[in-house]
Amino acid sequence: ETVDGKKQFADQLLPVIASIKNEIIKEHYIKKISTELDTSYESIVRELDKLRQPRVAHVQQEDPVKQKRTKEELLEEYLLALIVQNEAPKKALDTMMNILSEVMPKERAYHKVMDHLLSHFEHHADFNSDLFGNNLPKELVPTYDTCFLVTLPNFLDEEHAIEEVRKTAQQLKRIYIQKRLKALSLQMKQKEEAGQEDEVEALRKTYTALATHIE
């Protein structure tokens, strides 16, 4: 609710809105963000106009690391888009959880939005994308809205859409497991150097069991 908080919220979401090609969808989100920030429609439009000016390049030069995302993050965004844009989001979410429930971390905003989706479907059978987004914590709204605007392939039918969810979840599963295996390897090396053989053996068993889940 602070001025700095509103500025940070706008800084995250305005570039996403500016990239929207469809003017009808863009106007919808301009109205939505103006309501969220308790400001006028015109002021949001002026800020969007600023993004088209050369200063955008200066922002990228100022913080280039922030613009770069890993394959893992891109897949997470795509998977969340596949779920929230699906005609049967609960089925898509269940498909994902059947694959990722034991290995999905809880670190980033994508994971937290997934948790909110799980909680939603524990109490509701249907899904209203606008109401769900309005009830999210404000810090998660930019992540949710961005995923909702991702352009997806034109699937032949629901079966093909769910298959894409399954395939993407499998890709993420491999990445998550490989990261955990790498961390376990480092821990084993540290324990070996410290002469803690019992801990090394326990970590080795965990490593072996986890490695069997890579498909």
Image (tube, rainbow, N blue to C red):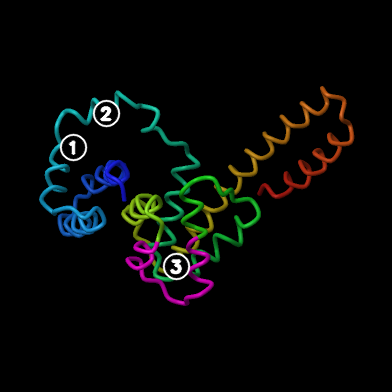
Give the residues in magenta: 116-135
Q: Which element carries disc 1, helix, strand or loop? A: helix
Mark 1 or mark 2: name the one nearer the start of the chain. 1
Amino acid beneath label 2:
Val
> Residue placed at 29% from the left, 23% from the top?
61
Pick whichever, 151 or 113, lies toward us. Answer: 113
Q: Position of residue 83 (x, y in %)?
A: 44, 61
The span from disc 1 to disc 2 (Cα, nearest Å) is: 10 Å
Amino acid beneath label 1:
Leu
Q: Position of residue 156 (x, y in %)?
A: 38, 65
Q: Judge the density around disc 3: few (<14), some (14-19), many (≥20) Cα neighbours within 10 Å.
A: many
> Residue placed at 19% from the left, 28% from the top?
55
Residue labelled with disc 1: 51
In the image, residue 143 above or below residue 136? above
In the rendered view, does 158 fall on the left or right side of 184? left
Per the rendering, the mark at residue 59 is 2
The span from disc 3 to disc 1 (Cα, nearest Å) is: 33 Å
Residue sitting at the far bottom: 125
Residue labelled with disc 3: 89
* Quadrant in which residue 35 is drawn: bottom left
Q: Main secondary structure of the magenta part?
A: helix
Foreground mark, 3 or 1, reads 1
Pick whichever, 55 or 1, lies toward us. Answer: 1
> Residue placed at 27% from the left, 42% from the top?
7
Amino acid beneath label 3:
Pro
